[in-house]
Image: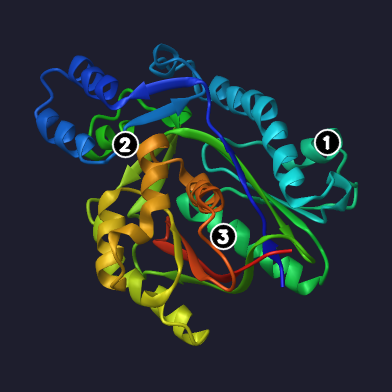
Amino acid sequence: MAVLCRPVTEVPEHVITMDDTLALARRLHHGHPDLELALRLISRTGVRKRHLIQPIERVLEHPGFDRRNELFTQEAKRRVPRVVQQALEHAGLTADRIDLIVFVSCTGFSMPSLTAWLINTMGFGPQTRQLPIAQLGCAAGVAAVNRAHDFCTAYPGANALVVACEFCSLCYQPTDLGVGQLLSNGLFGDAVAAVVLRGEGGTGIRLERNGSHLIPDTEDWISYAVRPTGFHFQLDRRVPATMEPLAPALAELAERHQWKVSDLDFYLVHAGGPRILDDLGRFLEVPDEAFRHSRATLTEYGNIASAVVLDALGRLFAEGSSVGDHRGILAGFGPGITAEMSLGSWTEA
């Protein structure tokens, strides 16, 4: 079975704190009828700071969709190789040993995918398979791990690389003034993350089963409106309550594997916001401490979309608490409304 090795997360150098965010909202939206509500919602996110690829003054400008997309590609090429190289080193592999690259982003677009550029510039073999994922939003981090797991299962001994590149600040839209949009402006951050799945050997999570679940008739609850100014994030007010129908899907996946979801050793969950984690803990009957890694990511980096779960995984490695055959679950939630889930046990080379 494939082993999910130690990941690497890198955040950009420009920082905006919660105090900065609240002050900025007051200045930019003075007189907005729902400003106080938006400020309360932002202050309850638990986000202490976020990292951006540009100074906030540049983020607030809108040079056009084309320029923003050019900036996405430029910054990705500057930042992704370093993270990929470190992830390969953590896994004890070189680029020519990778058989599949899964590249995930919902904040920029290019064709061909940046997987082609990585193959051409970092020593990956020309036969390396490419799998870009662009439309699963925050669920895509776990989806990428799952598709890489499927590949390694189909081709025993194969190795896969997952890259998540999310520059959420490039989706800031100064003309979007709804409460949900104002909340999003104070929640999302930028990050790049990478992780290797080894088909043989390796220390980390031995992946054993994965699954997906979609809540019917919710496809417009999390979405993009694509306009001349770019991607406009749309969030339905019902989204925070989606853990009630999704928690049973996590429990069912564990039951099919003869595990009890409330009796696992680690939980690596996409932290879209604090209520997601609060509700999930209640429905799964696990303590708040179970989501400490996800909460730490949210606090220190904000919602970094598909990279959240990879960063939470990195915090599990750093903590050093997983030993023996500790069992756990990874889960990401995104547009659809879709849950991507994966079960695995800790193993050491």
- At 29% from the left edge and 64% from the top edge, which residue is drawn? 287
User: Under tag 2, what secondary structure?
Assistant: loop
Q: Residues within 10 Å of mark 3 (few under 14, many from 20)?
A: many
Residue located 34% across and 43% down the image: 234
**Which tag, 3 or 1, sits closer to the chain's start?**
1
Could you tell me the amino acid type at mark 3?
Ala
Q: Which residue is mark 2?
A: 47
Spatial CA span between label 1 and label 2: 35 Å
In this rendering, the label closer to the viewer, 1 or 2: 2
State whether residue 243 is above or below residue 307.
below
> Toward the viewer: 281 or 120?
281
174 and 190: which one is in front? Answer: 190
Q: Is residue 167 visible?
A: no
Residue kind at label 2, given as amino acid type: Val
Identify the image's colour scheme: rainbow, by chain, secondary structure or one colour.
Answer: rainbow
Q: Secondary structure at mark 3?
A: helix
C-alpha span from label 3 to label 1: 24 Å
- In which quadrant of the rendered image does the N terminus lie? bottom right
Viewer-nearest residue: 197 or 136: 197
The residue carrying mark 3 is 143
Label 2 CA crowd tier, 10 Å (few <14, some 14–19, many 20+): many
Q: Which residue is mark 1?
A: 122
Cα separation, mark 3 vs mark 2, equals: 25 Å
Q: Nearer the viewer, mark 3 or mark 2?
A: 2
